[in-house]
Amino acid sequence: MAVMDAKNEIMDILQKVWTKLQGLPQATSLELGAFFVLVLFVGEFSDPTLCLLSL
């Protein structure tokens, strides 16, 4: 049951990220900069051995 809750939570997060990505063409330069800083932070400090598909 906890696995399904985790999958649902991850899917909700991915849905929100997808919605934000779709809005990037209309975003201000400040929003674009903040988004790319977050992407760089996640890419730099995430554990490459983690796999969302293993949930």
Image (tube, rainbow, N blue to C red):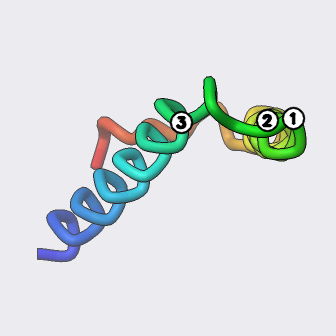
**Mark-to-mark CA distance, 2 and 1:** 5 Å
Q: Residues within 10 Å of mark 1 (few under 14, many from 20)?
A: few
Height in image: 17 above or below 12?
Answer: above
Image coords of residue 41 (percent x, y): 84, 43
**Mark-to-mark CA distance, 2 and 3:** 10 Å
Q: Residues within 10 Å of mark 3 (few under 14, many from 20)?
A: few
Outermost residue toward the left in this view:
1
Say left or right for 23 vs 45: left
The residue under the point 43% across, 52% down is: 16
The residue under the point 71% across, 43% down is: 46
**Mark-to-mark CA distance, 1 and 3:** 13 Å
At label 2, the amino acid type is: Leu
Image coords of residue 12 (percent x, y): 32, 58
Say left or right for 41 vs 52: right
Q: Which residue is mark 1?
A: 29
The residue under the point 79% across, 35% down is: 32
Callouts 2 and 1 close, C-beta under 8 Å? yes
At label 3, the amino acid type is: Gly
Q: Which residue is mark 2?
A: 32
Callouts 1 and 3 close, C-beta under 8 Å? no
Task: Tell which circle, 1 or 3, labels the residue nearer the N-terminal end.
Answer: 3
Task: Tell which circle, 2 or 3, labels the residue nearer the N-terminal end.
Answer: 3
The residue under the point 21% across, 71% down is: 5
Disc 3 element:
loop
Foreground tag (2 vs 1)? 1
Quarter of the rendering containing residue 44: top right
Disc 2 element:
helix
Q: Residues within 10 Å of mark 2 (few under 14, many from 20)?
A: some
Image coords of residue 37 (percent x, y): 87, 40
Say left or right for 37 vs 4: right
Q: Which residue is mark 3?
A: 23
Q: Nearer the viewer, residue 51 or 41?
A: 41
